[in-house]
Image: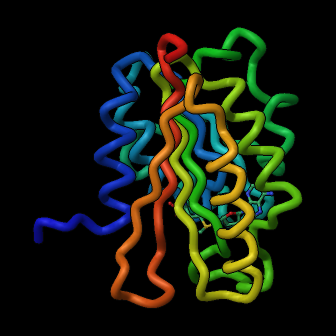
Amino acid sequence: MIVPAVLSFSHALVRQAVGEGGIAVDATAGNGHDTLFLAECVGSAGKVYAFDIQQEALCRTKQRLSERGIADRVSLFHAGHHEMDRYLPDETRGKLQAVMFNLGYLPHGDPAIITRPETTLPALETSTVWLAPGGVLSVVLYTGHPGGQEEAEHVLQWAQSLSPKAFQVMHYQLLNRKQAPSLVLVEKRKTAA
Ligand code: SAM
């Protein structure tokens, strides 16, 4: 297939921003797929910080990382992503090469526990501050669950409001599949345009 699936496209783009020894955040650890991906990108000299409000998600993530023998390069926080600036070490401010959000609910978990605009938007805003110049913020949006469409609209509105001098913003969406996930990618410019 020439047209990539949303999740693999997000990984392909994020991979370009995250190098060996880098620092990255998974804002919604869930089943740990993105945390593992980031941990592999940063390598043994790098560091990943991952957040989730569900202990179940953090256990699954820990398990996935342990199976690959790379749990030591990841710090897991049982906390909401809107609090990330309380948990991330001060010295990582402005140094994050990537922050990944995968919104919605935990697959194979409680579908009533979802990400919500009132915490997602502050977390996205904080992420833009903590990103390094050249760093990227990826947000996978889902609209098929109750509240998903509303959250997606808020995120798109927020993304469109970012200054083009400071950020490049794209939205990737399959137009002929209803309720397919879509991707917002924000790149922090190295120098103001
Ligand atoms: N990225 C994950 C993966 O690779 O498996 C999937 C993430 S799942 C779609 C969304 C996750 O966001 C759920 O595990 C849920 O508990 C978590 N979540 C919901 N609200 C949150 C919040 N305020 N802060 C951090 N995580 C949150």
How far from the left and from the top, in percent, is residue 17? 38, 28
Where in the figure is residue 113, as x and y percent of width and height? 79, 76
The residue closer to the viewer here, 41 or 127, is 127
Q: Nearer the viewer, residue 115 or 48?
A: 115
Horizontally, residue 8 falls left or right of residue 156, namely: left
Residue found at the very far left of the displayed protein: 1
Identity of the residue drawn at 45% across and 90% down = 178
> In front: 102, or 52?
102
Above-or-below relation of 7 to 75? below
Residue at 55% from the left image edge and 46% from the top image edge:
100
- The colour scheme of the drawn protein is rainbow
Position of the N terminus by quadrant: bottom left
Is residue 131 found left or right of 91 in the rendered image?
Answer: left
Q: Against 148, is 188 above or below?
A: above
Split into quadrants, the picture shows ligand 1 in the one at bottom right
Q: Hey, which quadrant is residue 157 in on the image?
A: bottom right
From the viewer's perspective, is residue 83 above or below residue 46?
Answer: below
Residue drawn at x 38%, y 52% is 10
* Residue 185 in view of the camera: yes
Tell whether 18 sits left or right of 160. Answer: left
Count the marks: how many?
Answer: 0
Task: Say which residue appears at 54% left-offset and 40% top-offset.
Answer: 137
Residue 142 in the figure: left or right of residue 174: right
Residue 35 appearing in the image? no
How far across and down, in percent of the image, does residue 127 sit?
Answer: 69, 34
